[in-house]
Amino acid sequence: MSDGLVAGLHIVATPIGNLGDLSPRAADTLRRADRILAEDTRITGKLLRHIGAKVPMTRYDDHSSEEDRQRVVAQLGDQAIALVSDAGTPLISDPGYKLVRAARAAGHTVHTVPGPSAATAALTLAGLPTDRFLFLGFLPAKAKAREDAIGEVADVRATLVMYESGLRLGSTLATLAERLGARDAAVAREISKLHEECVTGTLPDLAQRYADAAPKGEIVVIVAPATQAACATDEELDDALDEALGRLSPSRAAAEVAERLNIPRKRAYARALERAK
Ligand code: SAM
């Protein structure tokens, strides 16, 4: 039986770099849990040693089966079971939502101990609007799928937040610049660690900076929302292009209109070619 901790599932956020960010309540919950479900028991083992907790751990990750889940759910009636991920808030680009659903469906209580998450921490560094944001997690690894995913959110009037690896950062920023235009953006790296930094600039500037210089460490990319002009309708775009095409070549007209309406040059150019026919 749990040491005073109410039975059920306890979702516990852990630090994303600085162990000092583990909240007293998170530490207390981990110490008093009957069992801890961890993505990687070696990583969580270090955290437990840091807080002097000796609690049995079971692996729970993306490969856990329905059977594994039901085994956990069967124990929740009389045990306090904590779920952690390697770092940050479980379920945020990490395993857990199926377990939360299954636990609740079986009538067990689910508690959360909120804490660090790289997505919200990066938003606090970027200096971009935070009243509306869209979390995209990791974009698809394949170039075409990534381009499509970015295209899908091009007109969304919310700050975009995505996780990225150093190796892919340059090509992701290049695609973002091509599809979203010269929006303000930020690359937040190694948050709460020794080499924490947040580099800000327009998407083309950042794409150039990281083109041949893959940074080390963990990264969140933040991109400013589409502006009203960036959401220019096809009709508005056509009117502007028709006027510009009377004076300029399709490529120059597209460049001028793209800048004026603050839309991606690619969109203006494709339309300019159509209109020029
Ligand atoms: N659940 C975690 C959370 O709440 O932040 C995220 C897990 S996801 C598998 C890991 C990704 O989060 C990393 O690849 C990186 O993009 C981002 N990340 C995690 N820690 C970070 C840090 N200290 N600084 C910047 N990004 C970080």
Image (cartoon, rainbow, N blue to C red):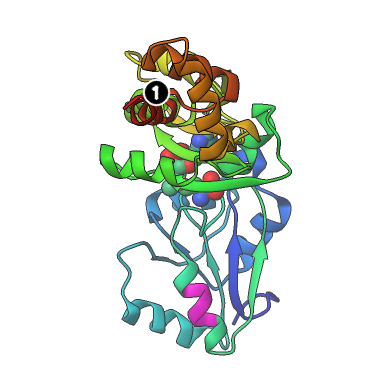
Asked whether 220 or 32 is in front, the reply is 220
List x then y, in percent, for residue 2: 62, 77
> Does residue 46 show up?
no
Give the magenta part as a residue range: 99-103
Mark 1: few, some, or many residues within 10 Å (few <14, many ≥20)? Answer: few
List x then y, in percent, for residue 171: 33, 26
> Does residue 29 show up?
yes
Q: Is residue 180 magenta?
A: no
Task: Name which residue lies at 56% across and 25% down.
Answer: 185
Task: Name which residue lies at 55% across and 67% down.
Answer: 82
Q: Is residue 171 above or below residue 21?
A: above
Q: Name the side, left or right, on which 62 lies relative to 157.
A: left
List x then y, in percent, for residue 200: 58, 19
Asked whether 226 or 240 is in front, the reply is 240
Say which quadrant the N terminus sits in.
Answer: bottom right
Q: Is residue 49 above or below residue 36?
A: above
Asked whether 257 or 180 is in front, the reply is 257
Q: Is residue 273 above or below residue 34?
A: above
List x then y, in percent, for residue 68: 35, 77
Residue holding disc 1: 216
- Residue 239 picture quarter: top right
Q: Name the side, left or right, on which 135 lies relative to 215.
A: right
Asked whether 253 or 11 is in front, the reply is 253
Q: Is residue 145 above or below residue 175?
A: below
The disc labelled 1 sits on which kind of residue?
Answer: Lys
Q: Main SS type for the magenta part?
A: helix
In terms of secondary structure, where does tag 1 sit?
loop
Say which quadrant the C terminus sits in.
Answer: top left
Number of residue marks: 1
Q: Is mark 1 within 8 Å of ligand 1?
A: no
Q: Is residue 102 magenta?
A: yes
- Residue 5 picture quarter: bottom right
